[in-house]
Image (cartoon, grey):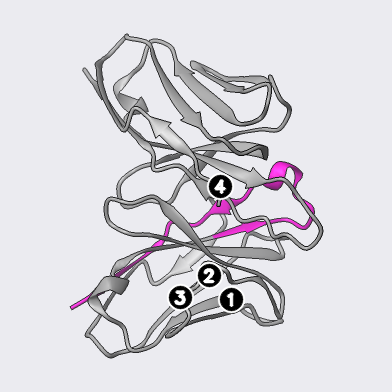
Amino acid sequence: TQLLEQSPQFLSIQEGENLTVYCNSSSVFSSLQWYRQEPGEGPVLLVTVVTGGEVKKLKRLTFQFGDARKDSSLHITAAQPGDTGLYLCAGAPVRTRGSARQLTFGSGTQLTVLP
Amino acid sequence: NAGVMQNPRHLVRRRGQEARLRCSPMKGHSHVYWYRQLPEEGLKFMVYLQKENIIDESGMPKERFSAEFPKEGPSILRIQQVVRGDSAAYFCASSPSGGAGNTIYFGEGSWLTVV
């Protein structure tokens, strides 16, 4: 069973601060996605990383996939109250013959950015 | 997550009744996934379907739960004889055939409350 551990579980910071959220596993994933979920809504895809060592930037968000494709991080620069939400990482299994593409989700990091 | 349509958004059922949740995937997507999010827990994979085929149902409870994705019409997640422990948010997601990096897109969810 593939497991993804996210840390920290909760994070409360002031507007303007920087933060990093981690997603770790002992398993290798073919790709990893980051989602943000707000109360009463579904997860919204932020980014997909596929290649080991890959770095993707989305405005103030920087996503990195570990070299061994076992871990990932999300760094937010100058956080704003609008960044508040539940951040979820999800790993896709390495494809083998007959395997399906179900994602394994981390338990999430609840981020609160205070004005 | 625009495009994946789920209904109803909220459903209240008494213990022992049946719940039917519907999901229309994004246009052009032929792969559908159902996930469940229990209170204070992460998203857990339930079932993966293509048109008229169940590809992977390894996350489905063995009893009372069933899913289908007919040739015409939405995918249906059916829960018979609901119990209080079935209260959760049920998310449908879809992906195009051969989607790069196994990226899937979520709907806004159906919140089931069993009273």
Q: Return the chain for callout 4.
A: A
Mark 3 or mark 2, whichever is nearer to me: 3
Residue beneath disc 3: B61
Tag of residue A2: 4
Name the amino acid, label 3: Pro
Label 1 amino acid?
Answer: Pro
B112 vs B71, left or right, is: left
Q: Is residue A75 magenta?
A: no
Mark with earlier residue (1, 3): 3
Identify the residue under disc 1. B74
- Name which residue type carries label 2: Cys
Disc assigned to residue B23: 2
**Which residue appears at 68% of the width and 60% of the height?**
B27
Let me know if marks 2 and 1 both belong to one chain.
yes
Tell which subunit mark 2 falls on: B
N-term mark: 3 or 2: 2
Disc 1 versus disc 4: distance between alpha carbons?
A: 30 Å
Q: Are marks 2 and 1 in contact (CB under 8 Å)?
A: yes
Marks 3 and 4 sit apart, C-alpha to C-alpha, by 19 Å
Are dots 2 and 4 on a single chain?
no
Span colored in magenta? B93-115
**Nearer the observer, disc 1 or disc 3?**
3
Q: Residue furthest left?
A: B115
Q: Where is residue B82 in the image (x, y as percent from the top left)?
A: 31, 83
**Whole-number angstrom distance, CA of label 2 to CA of label 1:** 5 Å
**Proximity of marks 3 and 2: CB atoms separated by less than 8 Å:** no
**Callout 3: chain:** B
Q: Chain under label 1?
A: B
**Residue at the image point whose x is 49% and y is 43% from the top:** A44
Residue A36 screen position, x and y as percent: 44, 38
- Which image quarter is the C terminus of chain A in? top left
